[in-house]
């Protein structure tokens, strides 16, 4: 029978061994305290309690207060069960059963703690199976059902230069279309499914894993999502910013679907970002060293920001003139390999063989650069270093662009798609949300009400000048792939070129510790909106986050690392938050165990004695 202990914060689970034991699967038996309030007194013996417990599961432990006749208001038994047993149909009486806490069990991954609908592993499988038909291939025909067979395909010629009907069923029409503006053909399928449930099971299975945004069908009382637009991976590649709007219902109970497809991104040129792939170029270190050693005068933090600003200009120019476009590099090196292979096949000389080896080595190097570029852009951290997953990175990047794109917003019941109006409403919404209209002047200073918990010795430790080694430890402990701030420099730059920039960074941190104000170039942040759900419609469904400069993060990390050392002395030992190695699970377990130790009420004690 499974039981759980926590040893140094790690759960240890024990259960009875069986021949089909697997370390990847947890036991589905749930140990739960089951309460029987109002149970008759003569049933408080172990044998009657065991009979009651066996009707539900396997009894593990009885409440000693019940056995000793101390607590007679409710009987408690720790029972292990898999499924709730059906009520007995023989003569007797109905007994109320209360389960104290039933842990969730996932039938997909066989782990306790979540349901199958919340399983992250199952979610990845669902996300990877949204493609309805193969690239260029005909779509699978679903079960037919009687429907009026009407089409209006002649109107398509005003939008598409060419179309061809490839399949015309009772439930769907399958077309091959050629777009007017671009040289591209694709398949599109219009589905009107069967009205009977048994004939629509296949269609329901295909649509079940599509994200639900709004409910475009209604009979006046019930709203449901019956109409969807599905596109395969190739279509999303051509139309990366695809969006669907549900128009107003008129004569039909279905909302018309307006598909808005754009073949390219709109907006300003992307901001500067230090690319991790640059460090693979042999000439980058010399560029950084020459620019960094130029004389700059001012306060230490101003000097650091000025050098980063000058280096940004040099790296932009160096990227265009020297490094080049990574996609073009891969294409050119691949062509060079093909040419060298042809020459080697024709001549079969040692010189041609050496040239072929050099061309292949250069091509492999360019592929590694491309992979690093896509890895940083996709921000995927769990892929192994040996994996060559450029196609996967491409798909992740396109999906991120699609998800974070804001095609429009709903304001006062009106759908707005103009970029300038979207920007104005965005600024106005969050300006109101984060503005404070309260008067900062108070009748009584609140600072006097806060007790002084930090000693003089601790305060001296907090404001002491950091050593170069302390700053280095902080920098190398931070995430090198974290999102960069407005200056564009991420942790990869600071870690790779630490020997060049170390003294300037240390002087800037020490300057802050002496009381120097942070310059605007260091405190500036980039605000990014992250959708809280798929298909966000209003600004309340977006979460704003601030991307700080890495130099600002270094100072914050130095302060937080020092504060973490004295925090256990400032926070009560009964509080589990903010202190390392303290777990909220310990308090939860104590809370659940507390009712078992609660003394019986006086009237219960008197009743037990009589």
Image: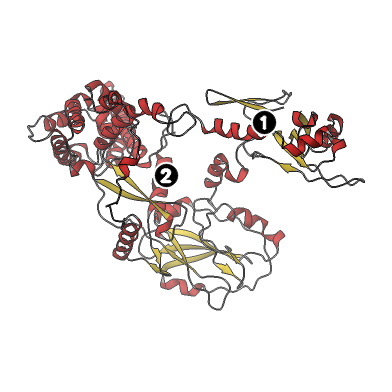
> Which residue reaches farthest right?
91
Q: Find residue 33 and report its horizontal and vertical position in percent.
A: 71, 35
- Where is the C terminus found, in terms of image quarters? top right
- The answer to whether one can see residue 283 in this image is no
Please tell me the numbered disc located at residue 597.
Answer: 1
Q: Find residue 528 and report its horizontal and vertical position in percent.
A: 33, 49
Please tell me the numbered disc located at residue 12.
Answer: none
Near-viewer residue (544 or 79): 79
Residue occupying image coordinates x 53% and y 57%: 212
- The answer to whether one can see residue 447 in this image is yes
Mark 1: give few (<14), some (14-19) or many (20+) Cα within 10 Å.
Answer: few
Mark 1–mark 2 contact, CB under 8 Å? no
The vertical placement of 166 against 6, above or below, is below
Residue marked by disc 2: 396
* Left or right of residue 518, residue 109 in this image: right
Q: State the SS at label 2.
A: helix
Residue occupying image coordinates x 65% and y 71%: 147
Q: Find residue 442 and report its horizontal and vertical position in percent.
A: 29, 51
Lower sequence index among marks 1 and 2: 2
Mark 2: give few (<14), some (14-19) or many (20+) Cα within 10 Å.
Answer: some
Q: State the SS at label 1.
A: helix
- Where is the N terminus found, in terms of image quarters? top right
> Which residue reaches farthest bottom?
251
Q: Quadrant of residue 475?
A: top left
Give the alpha-carbon distance from disc 1 to disc 2, as whole Å. 54 Å
Near-viewer residue (449 or 305): 449
Q: Find residue 561 and report its horizontal and vertical position in percent.
A: 33, 28
Residue occupying image coordinates x 32% and y 44%: 446
Near-viewer residue (307 or 190): 307
């Amino acid at each position: 029978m499974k039981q759980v202990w926590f040893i140094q914060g790690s759960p240890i689970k024990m259960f009875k061994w069986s021949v089909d034991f697997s370390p990847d699967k947890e036991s589905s038996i749930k140990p739960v305290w089951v309460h029987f309030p109002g149970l008759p007194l003569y049933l408080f013996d172990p044998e009657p309690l065991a009979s009651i417990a066996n009707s539900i599961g396997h009894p593990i432990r009885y409440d000693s207060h019940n056995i000793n006749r101390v607590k007679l208001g409710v009987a408690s038994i720790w029972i292990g069960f898999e499924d709730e047993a059906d009520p007995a149909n023989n003569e007797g009486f109905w007994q109320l059963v209360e389960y104290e806490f039933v842990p969730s069990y996932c039938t997909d991954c066989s782990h306790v703690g979540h349901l199958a609908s919340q399983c992250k592993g199952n979610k990845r499988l669902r996300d990877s199976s949204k493609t309805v038909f193969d690239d260029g291939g005909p779509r699978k025909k679903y079960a037919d059902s009687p429907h009026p067979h009407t089409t209006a395909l002649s109107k398509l010629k005003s939008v598409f230069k060419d179309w061809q009907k490839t399949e015309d069923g009772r439930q769907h029409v399958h077309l091959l279309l050629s777009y007017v503006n671009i040289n591209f053909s694709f398949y599109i399928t219009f589905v009107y499914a069967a009205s009977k449930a048994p004939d629509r099971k296949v269609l329901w299975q295909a649509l079940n894993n599509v994200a639900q945004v709004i409910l475009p069908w209604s009979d006046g009382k019930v709203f449901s999502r019956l109409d969807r637009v599905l596109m395969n991976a190739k279509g999303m590649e051509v139309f990366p910013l695809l969006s669907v709007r549900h128009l107003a219902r008129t004569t039909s109970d279905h909302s018309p679907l307006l598909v808005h497809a754009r073949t390219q991104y709109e907006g300003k040129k992307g901001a500067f970002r230090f690319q991790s792939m640059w460090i693979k170029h042999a000439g980058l270190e010399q560029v950084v060293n020459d620019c960094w050693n130029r004389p700059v005068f001012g306060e230490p933090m101003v000097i650091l920001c000025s050098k980063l600003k000058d280096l940004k200009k040099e790296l932009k120019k160096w990227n265009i003139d020297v490094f080049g476009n990574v996609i073009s590099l891969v294409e050119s090196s691949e062509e060079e390999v093909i040419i060298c292979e042809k020459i080697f096949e024709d001549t079969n000389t040692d010189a041609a063989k050496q040239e072929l080896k050099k061309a292949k080595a250069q091509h492999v190097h360019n592929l590694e650069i491309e992979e690093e570029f896509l890895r940083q852009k996709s921000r995927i951290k769990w892929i192994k270093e040996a994996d060559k997953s450029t196609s996967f990175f491409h798909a992740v990047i396109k999906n991120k662009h699609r998800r974070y794109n804001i095609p429009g917003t709903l304001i006062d019941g009106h759908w707005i798609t103009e970029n300038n109006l979207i920007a104005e409403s965005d600024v106005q919404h969050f300006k109101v949300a984060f503005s404070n209209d309260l008067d900062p002047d108070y009748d009584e200073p609140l600072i006097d009400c806060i007790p002084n918990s930090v000693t003089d010795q601790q305060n001296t430790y907090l404001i002491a000048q950091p050593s170069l080694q302390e700053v280095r430890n902080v920098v190398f402990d931070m995430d090198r792939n974290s999102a960069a701030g407005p200056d564009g420099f991420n942790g990869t730059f600071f870690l790779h070129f630490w020997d060049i920039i170390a003294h300037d960074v240390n002087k800037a941190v020490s300057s802050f510790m002496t009381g120097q104000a942070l310059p605007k170039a260091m405190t500036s942040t980039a605000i990014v909106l992250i959708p809280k759900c798929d298909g966000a419609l209003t600004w309340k469904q977006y979460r704003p986050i601030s991307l700080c400069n890495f130099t600002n993060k270094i100072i914050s990390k130095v302060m937080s690392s020092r504060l973490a050392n004295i925090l256990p002395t400032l926070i009560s030992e009964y509080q589990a938050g903010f202190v390392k190695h303290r777990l909220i699970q310990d308090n939860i377990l104590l809370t659940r165990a507390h009712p078992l130790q609660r003394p019986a009420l006086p009237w219960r004690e008197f009743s037990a004695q009589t």
